[in-house]
Amino acid sequence: MKKQTPHKPLPKSVKWLWGIVFAPFALLLLLLLLTAAGLFGRLPSFEELENPKSNLATEILSSDGKVLGTFFVQNRSYVQYDELFPLDSAQLLRLDGYDVPPIIAALISTEDVRYRGHSGIDLMSLVRVGVKTVLMQNTSQGGGSTITQQLAKNLFPRDTVRNRGAVVRKAKLVTSKFKEWITALKLEYNYTKEEIAAMYLNTVEFGSNAFGIKSAAHTFFNKEPDELNVQEAAVLVGVVNAPTRYSPILNPKNALVRRNLVLSRMEEAGALTRRQRDSLAALPIVTNYKPVSHNEGAATYFREMLRLVMNARPPKRSQFYNEWDYDQAVEEYNENPLYGWCHKNRKADGTPYNIYRDGLKIYTTINSVMQTYAEQAVQRQMEKEIQPKMDAQFRATKTLFVDAVTLFSHEALAAQFEEYSFEFSHNKVFWWVKVRMGRTGLCPTVSGGLLP
């Protein structure tokens, strides 16, 4: 019987070689486990992932459903994934076996072409970054972050403190990346791909004080997100990379080049044909720029009074000249639910509402069309009647104001208001109308304006 030869042990050099090969993977796994355990800092809980906090603009809506204005720290309004779909199904694009809106096709093609095939971390992109970007120092290849990882970074921002040494900053960057990986996996567990894509579009900045796709569509094209065509969607997705550099308003040439790059990516991903790409790339960028401002738009004075009323604090005796005025203010504050609404009402966590951050919807009885007509009428009356008389009086008498009632020549219009007053500063007229405040709602007649 043939004797079995004893198994020879591997040479030490081979063991060392295998150790060198597997050591980075073992170290990476260990760091991920330690990150998940919270050793490098707190990770968002599942409850926080299900209810992410974000600064949402409060919208003031007219009786006919138009947005009169907003209160915001960041001009952001959320949209659901279904709200991105155009009414005409012919405008949908086919990508990865799904019919998707143009904005989704542009986003996936540009930012994460394998979006449907990973669970938050794209290993192929990480290998590419490791080889081409880290080893070969080829920074043109882009990063390896998926849409889900970018969403994690947007919802739970990194530590951006810069007054540290280079080694500490790099270590912070590495641990932040690990946290984003873990958070991305949790997001994929909690949400569908469609929900993640919509959340990403709701959180990114587009420049011009527009945060989220809804605000961006209004600001740059004066459209709803579901009304964006392919080339407009490509412009907005291109802007996300660098909002100032690729802004169609500030840098139109850069924006055109970037848009065409996005269209090329869409062709490579299969969302567009070569002919479609070429025809769209030949078109200029046509914007309808409507930047949002607290001081522009309809019913500006009404909106300001609304802000003051809803944020009002309980009256203090020191704010009033006599006891009667103070008692009247206290009675109004206690009986009118609108006065101090943000402080009288509490959120689920017990904190008061913030009119700038909590995305409230304020419904008013103002009709946007009638409001426009009223403001135009006031503007014409100011230009043709009041301002010329004011200028003539000042030239003749060097006196700014004699009698407000005689200056208000259109008595029929004046009789409709509950209260009015005039204030003058040199040769400028500031016109103000007190808005009626109902017990259960806002019943404004018209708001004022400033005539330079």
Image (spheres, rainbow, N blue to C red):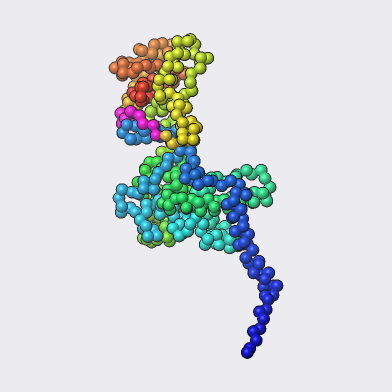
Residue 443: x, y in percent? 34, 24
The answer to whether 421 is drawn above or below residue 245 in the figure is above
Looking at the image, which residue is at 31% across and 16% down?
A: 415
Residue 18 in view? yes
Q: Is residue 365 magenta?
A: yes
Image vertical order of residue 163 relative to residue 365, above or below = below
Q: Please state, as top left, top right, bottom left or bottom right, where the C terminus lies in the image.
A: top left
Q: Nearer the viewer, residue 106 or 385?
A: 106
Classify residue 423 as left or right of residue 166.
left
Is residue 253 in sight in this rendering?
no
Q: Nearer the viewer, residue 252 or 77?
A: 77
Magenta stretch holds residue 405: no
Q: Residue at x 42, y 57 (%)?
A: 266
Instruction: Write the start and end of the magenta stretch as one range.
Output: 361-372
Nearer the observer, 385 or 162: 162
Residue at (53, 61) in percent of width and height? 123
Q: Is residue 1 left or right of residue 196?
A: right
Question: Which residue is at a point 34% across and 22% down the rendered structure image?
Answer: 381
